[in-house]
Image: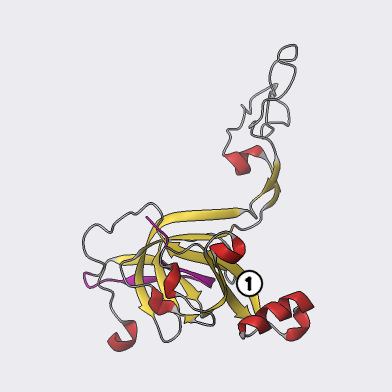
Amino acid sequence: MALTKGLLGKKVGMTQLFDTSGKQIPVTVVEVGPCVVSQIKTKENDGYEAVQLGYGDVTPKHVNKPQAGHFAKADVANKKHLKEFKFANFSEYELGKVLKADVFTVGDIVDVSGTSKGKGFQGTIKRFNNHRIKETHGSGPVHRHAGSMGACSSPSRIYKGKTMPGHMGAETVTVQNLEIVKIDVENNLIAIKGAVPGPNGSLVCVINAVKGTQLKGKPAQIIDQRSAN
């Protein structure tokens, strides 16, 4: 499926909603936008077509001269984050256009990308879910170690992909085919069913599902807690 919707945002945190039947729905609240179109790239000037979106205001002292010139040329405020999107409906965007949460609708299936939580240096059990060795007599204090690395004479090396201890987390992760169950246009908040990568307050990117998964059945009818109370 072609890319038609996309916004940068901030993960607020997880909570729960209830539909009209009383079923609990775990959701992640994401503040998407407002994002501004800071540059439009064309085949004539750049060799490809893309829309650059800026998100998050930043003070002028944290922007260098090339960046300040870039924003001044587009006549937009200084932004902290920039990202390009290759939208199929490229011609519908214009410089300075502001995109908000109303880009999405309830029932949309989206992909969410973010930077996972950093776990530091971890062993193979936590990092790759490896098993422990036996803890009976003779095993020694190494029951959580990685174990044998392979034969010593042949091939006399460790194959690529061997599960080894090392740095865990702090990498780009994408969770696909998540459903938007509620949208608060006034506050630019969307509630996405399930979990998304990254800690609270981290930058996330929300786009329409690239694999084209369609929602089975009707979107969940969420009870408005504000009116219920």
Residue 146 in which image quadrant: top right
- Type of secondary structure dominating the magenta stretch: strand
Give the percent coordinates (x, y) of residue 82.
Answer: 61, 70
Give the percent coordinates (x, y) of residue 166.
Answer: 71, 42
Residue at position x 37%, y 55% from top? 1
Quarter in which the C terminus is drawn: bottom left
Q: Is residue 78 visible?
A: no
Identify the residue position indicated by label 1 in the image.
Answer: 81
Q: Nearer the viewer, residue 116 or 132?
A: 116
Give the percent coordinates (x, y) of residue 174.
Answer: 51, 55
In the image, residue 129 lies in the stretch drawn in magenta: no
Give the percent coordinates (x, y) of residue 223.
Answer: 28, 78
Residue 21 in which image quadrant: bottom left
In the image, residue 15 lies in the stretch drawn in magenta: yes
Residue furthest front as drawn: 44
Residue 218 in which image quadrant: bottom left
